[in-house]
Image (cartoon, rainbow, N blue to C red):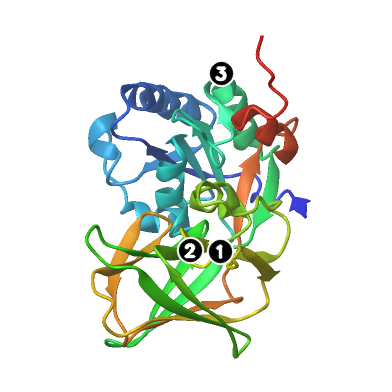
Amino acid sequence: MADNFLRLPPKKLGLVVKTSSPEAIALGRQVLGKVRSLGMEVVVDAQSAPHLETPSGPPRGELGSQVDVVLVLGGDGTFLSAARGCPPTTPVAGVNLGTLGFLTEHPAEQLWELVAALATGDVHCERRDRLLCLVEGGGGPQRFLVLNDVVIAKGTLARILVIDVEVEGEFLSRYRADGLILASPTGSTAYNLSAGGPIVHPLLPALIITPICSHTLSNRPLVVPLSFRVAVRVHPGDEDVFLTLDGQYGMPLDERHVVRILPEGDPLWVVRPRQTSFFAILHDKLKWGDWGG
């Protein structure tokens, strides 16, 4: 499902740059002047502001709630950090200054065309489902919105993990593996892809369950409806186990914890290039059909 979900005309644009990239910083300084000349106010997150020599705005995780649209100059990691606190009423546009760029889909050479379109609201927005991750035990429950994936993995010296998974209250499997990935369709092209999981079209309402280096050959990735509730537990004795959310935030896990994936997550709206389909992105990023020579 696609729709124009940008409030018209947008009055405030949030700007986030990859602070380790000189190219992103240089372009960010140019964007400041251009956006202001188009009649919009620019709010720069606190992490980016010192590099752009501009007044500091809110922390990155709170930026989306204070603007009409967020523009990200960087890679997928920068995009994920910017999107983490965005409500479903604030679309995010990503300009790829990183490497693979499945989330930052706009090429740098189309930056000024994108900025002009954002100023008028003439953009193509696409709904992306996010996972609601609830961590129970070891204190009060903690809730997280996740765009890409929830990963349970061992530390460097940990033994093979034993992980129990339930789906809709029914026992699914006891995985003996290096870890487990619970991915959204948007996250299917991230860690899930590297671990041998399936690529799922981002508009499908689905949840992907992928073991990492399973020690049981019959264990295979599984795709279930996004409406299903999943519960995950690690076994007693498993030490140095970590839960990582979108590669941005981590916390230790033990047998006291239950990790639940629930269908109530608010969606994120992503500003996408009009002329580029998901299949064209796969062809370009993964070099499908590229025989060389």
What amino acid type is highlighted by mark number 1?
Leu
Badge nearest the viewer, 2 or 3: 2
Decide which of 189, 11 is in the foreground and name it.
189
Residue 289 spot, x, y in % from top left: 73, 26
Residue 268 spot, x, y in % from top left: 58, 57
Pointer 2: what residue? Answer: 214
Pointer 3: what residue? Answer: 109
Residue 145 spot, x, y in % from top left: 48, 67
Q: Is residue 49 left or right of residue 292?
A: left
Quadrant (top left, top right, bottom left, bottom right) of the C terminus: top right
Evaluate if marks 2 and 1 touch, with contact meaning CB atoms under 8 Å apart.
Answer: yes
Crowd band around label 3 with a 10 angstrom C-alpha radius: few (<14), some (14–19), many (20+): few
Crowd band around label 1 with a 10 angstrom C-alpha radius: few (<14), some (14–19), many (20+): few
Badge nearest the viewer, 2 or 1: 1
Picture quadrant of residue 217 = bottom right
Q: Earlier in the sequence, mark 3 or mark 1?
A: 3
Pointer 1: what residue? Answer: 217
> Is residue 290 positioned above or below 252 on the image?
above
The residue shown at (52%, 56%) is 148
Label 3, secondary structure: give it: helix
Label 3 – label 1 distance at C-alpha: 46 Å
What amino acid type is highlighted by mark number 3?
Glu
Decide which of 237, 249 is in the foreground and name it.
237
Label 2 – label 1 distance at C-alpha: 7 Å
Residue 174 spot, x, y in % from top left: 50, 79
Crowd band around label 2 with a 10 angstrom C-alpha radius: few (<14), some (14–19), many (20+): some
The residue shown at (29%, 30%) is 52
Label 2, secondary structure: give it: loop
